Image (spheres, grey):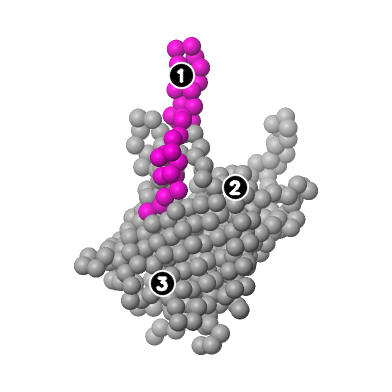
Amino acid sequence: MRCKKFLLFFSFFSMYSVSGQVGGESVYQFLNLSTSARQIALGGEVLTLMDDVNQPIWNPAVINPELDGKIAVNYSSFLAGINMGSISYAQQLSRRFGTIHGSIKYLDYGTLIGADESGLETGNFNANDIAISVGYSFNLPWTNVYMGTNIKFISSNIANFTSFGAAIDFGILYYSPYKAYSFTIVGRNMGVQMKSYNGMRENLPSKISFGASYQLEYVPLKWYATLDNLQQWDVSVPNPSNQTIDLEGNIITEKIGFLGNSLRHFIIGAELLPESVINLRVGYNFRRGAELKLQNVRTFGGISFGFGIQMNRLKFNYAFSKYHSASNNSTFSLQIDLDKR
């Protein structure tokens, strides 16, 4: 009965999220920014990490007893001086009930300069976003299928304007420790803006993603792939750098075909020596690479890489992601196993 209700809710919210937007067309966009160094190094959208206490923020179906007692702290010096980070913790309440997961995620825009309609400065102001989530998952009896959900409470402040919202994530995961592959489908940020900034409510950045991973048999290499934004086929945005001018001086914008739009849904990553003390990782986000590239310049946009080092009960992860020739992003994560001696 519990499974039937879960599937009913998942189907309902999946249909609801079909109207979800991408890009900057919705509020609380920070919900779709990863703060995990391991995830960022693998492309930023990995969904099948079973041993990382940061992963349930993106996919609640991965919550499992192996995460019990683990805590992670993440920090990222994001673009233009923006600071971003999160803290995650998992606790097994009992063998029968299972494990719950909690997280706090924030984005601090720092001090900004205010101006009126005429461009006259009106003083400085601050802006920040924060989301608190609680998640739980369960295993369907006698199967390798897991189902999970997160409940999120969101707060956003811009100067004297404040907004509140609530959202739910749902995930269905197939995973077996005896199989080389796993796959999942996740619906994220499906909810409402309960209090708007100025009386006009906006949509949340809801989306549906499919993720998979595969461990090679004779090589210590694990592959990850994600199909992102499945709720919306056309996610392409013309790159201004690819504009051309004809002989009459008319500006011709970039035309994106079927293949170009299809690739924008893909994120891929690879992890070398995933079970070792030291891990090496690399990833590529096709959409980011296509939309931030420059003509005749190698920007390496969309590429990310990093490493992880296990030190007894501590694990340190680092990620470097390339957005543009003028902007890079470094992310640091520290995971502590409180139960390990």
Q: Which residues are magenta?
A: 240-268
- Neighbour tally class for label 1: few under 14, some 14-19, many 20 plus, Cα within 10 Å: few
Ranked by sequence position, the earlier of labels 2 and 1 is 2
Front-most of residues 180 and 55: 180
Q: Is residue 202 left or right of residue 322?
A: right
Image x and y of residue 109, in percent: 59, 50
- Under mark 2, the amino acid is Gln
Q: Residue at x 51, y 51 (%)?
A: 229
- Neighbour tally class for label 2: few under 14, some 14-19, many 20 plus, Cα within 10 Å: some
Residue tagged 1: 245
Q: In terms of secondary structure, where does tag 3 sit?
A: loop
Residue tagged 2: 21
- Under mark 3, the amino acid is Tyr
- Neighbour tally class for label 3: few under 14, some 14-19, many 20 plus, Cα within 10 Å: many
Residue tagged 3: 175
Q: Residue at x 28, y 71 (%)?
A: 276
Gap between marks 1 and 3, in whole Å?
52 Å
Residue 136, magenta (yes or no): no
Ranked by sequence position, the earlier of labels 3 and 2 is 2
Front-most of residues 229 and 334: 229
Q: Residue at x 37, y 54 (%)?
A: 268
Return the residue found at the far bottom: 95
